[in-house]
Amino acid sequence: MTQGVLITGCNGGIGKGLVKAFHDAGWFVVGLDLTERDTAVETDHFIKCDLADFVSDEKKLNSFAGEVRASLGERPLAALVNNAAIQILGGVKELLPQAILDSFTVNTAAPYALVKAFATDLEESEGAVVNIGSVHAQATKPQFVAYATSKAALHGLTRALAIDLGPKVRVNTLAPAATETSMLKAGFKGNEEGYAALKDAHPLKRVASPDEIAGIALFLASKDARFLTGATIYADGGVLSRLYDPT
């Protein structure tokens, strides 16, 4: 029987790669995004909604879960990919504490809410949760205090959920480094030297493609990864292994 997967943030660069990878592998893909449906994204069912609502409004969460189950029909929900995230930039002197709370709401609390809502479904299918983390959880840079902190919390949540939901549900984190999305390219518009330097900072001398990240997520959701849980897989091109030391 065809398996179902729920992918959040499906309209984004990595999200599109995730949808394509799972769709091409024969999964029934339910996509969620804050923005209107992107017709180029091959979801079998699309739901437009705000993840932040699921943290504060249980009725909306339950209604969403009901729509997901109805769209799946008899198909089991075998994977949940928590990909959606917000990135609020700012240093300590200008960043308000509310930015930390907003980041935690979308990047940490909402993934928890979705896992809680679909825990029984995932137990019945002996499925998997893949949380899309970030290298910023391990090593960050100025202006990323809110994002890095919320992603570090998501990595911790992965480990806790793996213990709580084992042995029936596996929970892992996939933490990419810089990935070649339209958003990343827009951030370097007119700064080709900066983009080249970013690539050069990685030992592989390039950034990741969305397809590469999606392929790892597909593996983590599959039975081939059945002995992996509570783990963080860093798809970082070696950047976290590199020491920047003045010579």
Image: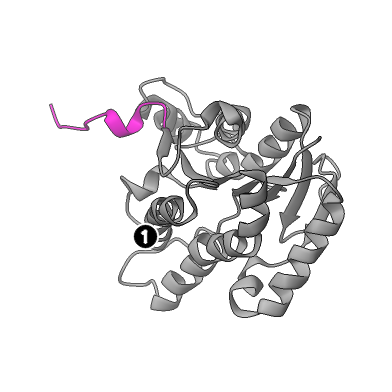
Count of numbered circles on the image: 1
Residue closest to the eye, 232 or 149: 232
Q: Quadrant of the N terminus?
A: top right
Which residue sits at x=70%, y=49%?
A: 6
Image check: 92 left or right of 20?
left
The stretch drawn in magenta includes residue 244 = yes
Q: Quadrant of residue 13?
A: top right
Query: What is the crowding at mark 1: few (fewer than 14 residues within 10 Å), some, or many (at least 20)?
Result: some
Image check: 195 left or right of 221?
left
Amino acid identity at mark 1: Thr
| Residue 48 position (above or below residue 213) | below
Helix, strand or loop: magenta stretch = loop
Residue 151 screen position, x and y as percent: 42, 55
The stretch drawn in magenta includes residue 102 = no
- Residue at the farthest top position: 204
Image check: 7 left or right of 83?
right
Residue 86 screen position, x and y as percent: 55, 59
* Residue 123 visible in the shown view: yes
| Residue 127 position (above or below residue 213) | below
Which residue sits at x=78%, y=61%?
A: 48
Residue 164 screen position, x and y as percent: 45, 57
Which residue sits at x=75%, y=46%?
A: 76
Residue 201 screen position, x and y as percent: 35, 29
Point out the stretch of residues depicted in magenta.
235-247
Which residue is disc 1 drawn over? 149
Which residue sits at x=32%, y=46%?
A: 138
Residue closest to the eye, 119 or 40: 119
